[in-house]
Image (spheres, grey):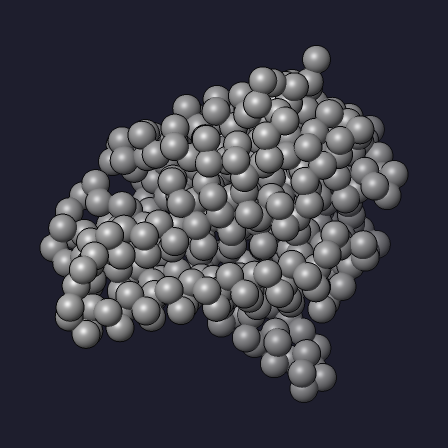
């Protein structure tokens, strides 16, 4: 029986996310303080069927759209940023696998059924690898042997399989990028407990070391050009960036809510303006995200336009989240400076938004390159 078939599976996704949010909020401060993984959150996400949100209904999931998953991650972000960001990595890999399934691509259905039936967690290394992945792949009979260290591998402690990539030196075509799935249970795969950071401290995003692991040909999902955002990567970014942005916008909303409560009844005109500015920035960022989701739709085909819509919205959310948390700290005053404050944690967590590719400045440059008609590069 599918793990999504629970006593609460009839509830809307946002309602289920809110239920999870109330639960994970109780653990958020402790995991942030100790830099420990938000393991209770994954128990709750699995129980509520949310890990299978993007799995098509016919395969046992909720069949959620990219917009619905984005809204779900935003709700989680209001309660625990680490949970929202870490699980966003699973969600966008699952959503892309659903996109592959709708096109009849090999391996997609089996993976999606395991997400729905077994509650497996999919780990992505694309944020650090992107167009220039770390490590190497060597061709052998029946597949490849791969080695390398993967950084920022969120939710590694509960991961089942890693959606990753390695460079391969093809004697005829030059350097290629091979996208592949690597089970974390494989001999030669090792998690490194080195996640000790400014923010997102409960995301479990430590390194994963891959040492001479065999990957059969059937687990190689793509053979792409090196150093280029090619059509498959355009699709991945179009799906992933709204979902990730939703997590950060939820965190920003938590800071606005906390600052508004702290300033309740204030007659100070500066405080009133700051509250208004926070609400303004969050609303505009929400409109940017909603607008991008309309352009992206369900990503029927690769598109530079869809990708840039996603990246533009991500840039707006990243900048707004930082500005909002700065303002929230000013409004709430000294109490927000103390460890354990929702604002203090949000202030640190949102700093991570700029590190997801493309960075805000890279986004502007690529937009400009497209506008003036020169080749894009990274």
Residue 14 sits in quarter = top right
Q: Is residue 291 shown to the viewer in this render? A: yes
Farthest residue, direction right: 104
Q: Is residue 184 shown to the viewer in this render? A: no
Q: Position of residue 283 (x, y in %)?
A: 46, 64
- Which sits in the foreground, 289 or 109? 289
Compared with 11, 240 (above or below) is below
* 149 relative position to 278: left or right: right
Q: Position of residue 98 (x, y in %)?
A: 75, 39
Which quarter of the rendered picture does the N terminus lie within? top right
Farthest residue, direction top: 1
Which quarter of the rendered picture does the C terminus lie within? bottom right
Residue occupying the point 70% across, 64% down: 295
Farthest residue, direction left: 334
* 102 relative position to 245: left or right: right
Compared with 371, 183 (above or below) is above
Q: Position of residue 86 (x, y in %)?
A: 48, 39
Residue 309 sits in quarter = bottom right
């Amino acid at each position: 029986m599918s793990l999504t078939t629970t006593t609460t599976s009839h509830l809307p996704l946002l309602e289920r996310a809110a239920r999870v949010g109330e639960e994970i909020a109780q653990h958020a401060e402790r995991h942030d303080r100790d830099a420990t993984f938000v393991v209770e959150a994954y128990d709750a996400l699995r129980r509520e069927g949310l890990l299978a949100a993007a799995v098509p209904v016919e395969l046992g999931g909720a069949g959620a759209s990219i917009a619905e998953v984005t809204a779900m991650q935003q709700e989680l972000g209001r309660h625990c940023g680490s949970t929202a960001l870490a699980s966003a990595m699973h969600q966008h890999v699952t959503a892309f696998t659903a996109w592959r399934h709708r096109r009849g691509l090999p391996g997609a259905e089996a993976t999606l059924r395991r997400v729905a039936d077994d509650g497996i967690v999919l780990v992505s290394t694309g944020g650090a690898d992107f167009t220039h992945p770390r490590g190497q792949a060597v061709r052998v009979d029946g597949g490849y042997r791969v080695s390398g260290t993967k950084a920022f591998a969120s939710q590694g402690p509960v991961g089942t399989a890693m959606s990753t990539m390695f460079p391969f030196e093809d004697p005829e075509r030059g350097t290629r990028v091979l996208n592949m799935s690597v089970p974390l249970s494989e001999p030669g795969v090792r998690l490194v407990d080195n996640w000790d950071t400014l923010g997102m401290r409960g995301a479990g995003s430590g390194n994963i070391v891959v040492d001479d692991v065999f990957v059969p040909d059937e687990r190689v999902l793509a053979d792409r050009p090196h150093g280029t955002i090619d059509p498959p990567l355009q699709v991945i970014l179009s799906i992933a960036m709204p979902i990730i942005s939703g997590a950060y916008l939820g965190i920003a909303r938590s800071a606005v809510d906390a600052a508004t409560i702290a300033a309740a009844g204030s007659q100070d005109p500066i405080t009133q303006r700051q509250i208004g500015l926070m609400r303004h920035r969050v609303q505009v960022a929400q409109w940017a995200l909603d607008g991008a989701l309309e352009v992206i739709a369900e990503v029927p085909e690769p598109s530079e336009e869809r990708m840039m819509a996603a990246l533009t919205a991500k840039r707006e959310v990243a900048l707004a989240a930082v500005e909002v948390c700065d303002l929230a700290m000013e409004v709430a005053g000294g109490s927000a400076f103390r460890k354990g404050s929702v604002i203090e944690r949000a202030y640190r967590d949102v700093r991570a938004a700029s590190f997801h590719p493309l960075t805000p400045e890279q986004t502007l440059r690529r937009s400009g390159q497209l506008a003036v008609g020169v080749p894009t590069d990274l």
